[in-house]
């Protein structure tokens, strides 16, 4: 069972997180969320961040999205194509604009990124089609299901063609069956587009199904406990993968690592 794999060359590294720490301070308390995180995200890979609740996964993702700055250490990100945004984020909670139609939810950030309206509508139509939302362009988000809202948020992020797609438990709020379907959709989309993806999840199965590597974090303050290479070839067939002995062995190994970190009070 490979852990971490060969060290990446500099030109294979999209994001380099170096000794990053994060402390939140307020009058009431001081929370050390991250301690000395070292992690490389390789160009074109699907990296999953897995760890116990509160270990700092979202904080690390927000630092990569430049929504939060580290308290210590540094982060380097390679922006290769000035015509594409460096990153785009999908959050857990269907972060769509309720007052805009589904079409305009996808069009709006494209206009902000310099697209002309006509081109933006064409691009939006393409991505809405990819996410099986054709026919819902004129609907408002609150009139469709949670799964559809989340597909709008994913279409919006992908339409921007970010070099780095950051996803914070994008499927966590969905029911189990819908989650499986969207996992398959994401697998399919990623296999065709191959952006670099960092994907936060609590689900070991999801990480094994989607990820090239899984960074397992320890309990707060979050550290990288280990980075596991996922050995399944692509394109992946979810049913085959779930039935394979390697899947069961890896799931067991990761669960034992996580269980050491979990505290039930
Ligand atoms: N803005 C903030 N101010 C103060 N504390 C914060 C802030 N953001 C996060 N924290 C704290 O930092 C720690 C890490 O939070 P974070 O949300 O990054 O963890 P997580 O691993 O994503 O959690 P979960 O899996 O439950 O979503 C937690 O103790 C949280 O309460």
Image (tube, rainbow, N blue to C red):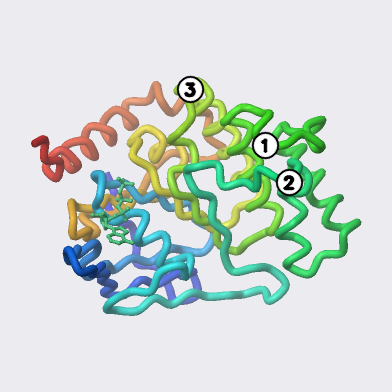
| Near-viewer residue (145 or 196) | 145
Quadrant of the image containing the N terminus: top left
Image spot of residue 216 (x, y percent): 27, 50
Tell me: 118 left or right of 157. Answer: right
The single residue placed furthest to the right in the displayed view is 118
Q: Which residue is identified by label 3?
A: 239
Q: Residues within 10 Å of mark 2 (few under 14, many from 20)?
A: some
Question: Disc 1 or 3, which lies upstream in sequence?
Answer: 1
Q: Secondary structure at mark 3?
A: helix
Residue 24 is situated, as x and y percent measured from the top left of the image, at 26, 67
Would you say 241 lies left or right of 227 here?
Answer: right
Q: Nearer the viewer, mark 3 or mark 2?
A: 2
Label 2 sits on residue:
100
Q: Residue furthest left?
A: 265
Give the spatial CA distance, label 3 vs label 2.
Answer: 38 Å
Label 1 sits on a secondary structure element that is: helix
Using the image, determine if residue 143 lies above or below residue 52: above
Alpha carbon distance from label 1 to label 3? 32 Å
Badge number at residue 141: 1
Q: Is disc 1 in contact with disc 2, using a CB cutoff of under 8 Å?
A: yes
* Label disc, if present, on residue 223 of the rendered structure: none
Identified at 17% across, 66% down, the residue is 30
**Marks 1 and 2, Cα distance to the nearest angstrom?**
8 Å
Using the image, determine if residue 106 lies above or below residue 238. below
Disc nearest the viewer among 1 and 3: 1
Q: Position of residue 109 (x, y in %)?
A: 71, 59
Image point (37%, 32%), residue name: 205
């Amino acid at each position: 069972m490979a852990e971490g794999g060969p060290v990446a060359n500099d030109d294979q590294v999209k994001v380099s997180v170096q000794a990053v720490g994060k402390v939140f301070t307020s009058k009431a308390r001081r929370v050390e969320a991250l301690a000395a995180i070292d992690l490389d995200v390789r160009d074109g890979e699907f990296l999953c961040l897995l760890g116990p609740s509160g270990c700092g996964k979202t904080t690390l993702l927000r630092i990569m999205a430049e929504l939060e700055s580290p308290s210590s250490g540094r982060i380097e990100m390679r922006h290769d194509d000035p015509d594409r945004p460096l990153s785009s984020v999908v959050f857990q909670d269907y972060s769509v604009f309720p007052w805009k139609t589904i079409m305009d939810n996808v069009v709006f950030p494209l206009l902000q990124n310099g697209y002309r309206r006509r081109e933006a509508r064409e691009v939006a139509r393409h991505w809405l089609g990819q996410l099986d939302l054709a026919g819902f362009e004129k609907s408002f988000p609150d009139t469709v299901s949670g799964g559809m809202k989340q597909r709008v948020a994913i279409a919006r992020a992908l339409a921007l063609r970010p070099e780095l797609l950051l996803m914070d438990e994008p499927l966590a709020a969905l029911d189990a069956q819908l989650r499986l379907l969207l996992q398959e959709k994401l697998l399919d989309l990623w296999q065709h587009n191959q952006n670099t993806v960092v994907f936060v999840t609590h689900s070991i199965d999801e990480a094994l199904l989607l990820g090239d590597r899984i960074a397992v974090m320890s309990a707060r303050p979050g550290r990288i406990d280990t980075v596991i290479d996922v050995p399944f070839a692509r394109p992946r067939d979810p049913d085959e993968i779930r039935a394979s002995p390697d899947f069961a062995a890896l799931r067991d190994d990761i669960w034992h690592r996580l269980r050491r970190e979990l505290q039930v009070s």
